Image: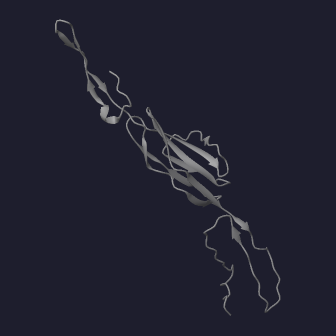
Amino acid sequence: LTIPSLVKSDGGRYYCTVTNELGRSMRSDDVTLTVVEPPSIRTHPTSQLTTVSMKVTLNCKGTGRGSIRYHWETKTINQKRWSNISNSNTSTLVVKKSQQSRQYRCIVSNEAGGTRSNVATVTILRITMQPNGAATVIALQDVTLTCSASVDDVTYSWHRVSGSVPSISR
C-alpha cells in the first residue's frame, strides 16, 4: 500500500489480507500509522526597544505532536545570513546587554520538520547627539539645546538638575 502525500487524517490502523486461489484468506497483524506534522508556532517573539544596559526576554511557543524542540538564530539588521545561538534550546531567549540592534527568530521542530517564527527586532536606543557639556550665553538671548536618539518615534523631554525648566513661552 502506498499512500501519496500523506496527511494527518490518513493516520489510523491498517492491516493486509492475503487470499490464495482457493479463496482462503489470512489477515495480517494491525499496524498503527501515526502521521506527525511539523509544529506550528502559537506565540511569536515580539520586537522590543531597549537600552544597552537592559536585558530583553523573547518568547516563542510551538505546538504539535511529538517532542517539540527550540532553537534561536540571530543576525544584525543589515546581514543576510542568520547565525545559530549556542545553548538556545528553550522557548525563552534572554538577550543580555546587547551593544547593537539585532534580529532574532525561533525555530520550533519535531521529528517531522521545523517552522520558523516571525522575526523580532531588538532595537538599542542610544543618544546620538549629546547636548554640549557647557554653554555660556548672553542674557536676554535665545539658546537652543539639542539632543537626538538613534530611533524615530521617541518623545524628548528636558529636565533641570536643580529646579524646573524655564517656561518656553515668556
Quarter the N terminus occupies: top left
* In the image, residue 135 above or below residue 15: below
- The image quarter containing residue 169 is bottom right
Answer with left or right where residue 33 lies relative to residue 40.
left
- The image quarter containing residue 140 is bottom right
Q: Is residue 96 visible?
A: no
Q: Residue at horizontal 37%, vertical 37%?
A: 65
Q: Residue at horizontal 21%, vertical 8%?
A: 20
Q: How many marks?
A: 0
- Give x and y (percent) for residue 82: 62, 43
Quarter the C terminus occupies: bottom right
- Its colouring scheme is one colour
Q: Nearer the viewer, residue 73 or 158?
A: 73
* In the image, residue 4 above or below residue 160: above
- Give x and y (percent) for residue 59: 49, 50
Q: Residue at horizontal 60%, vertical 46%?
A: 74
- The image quarter containing residue 68 is top left
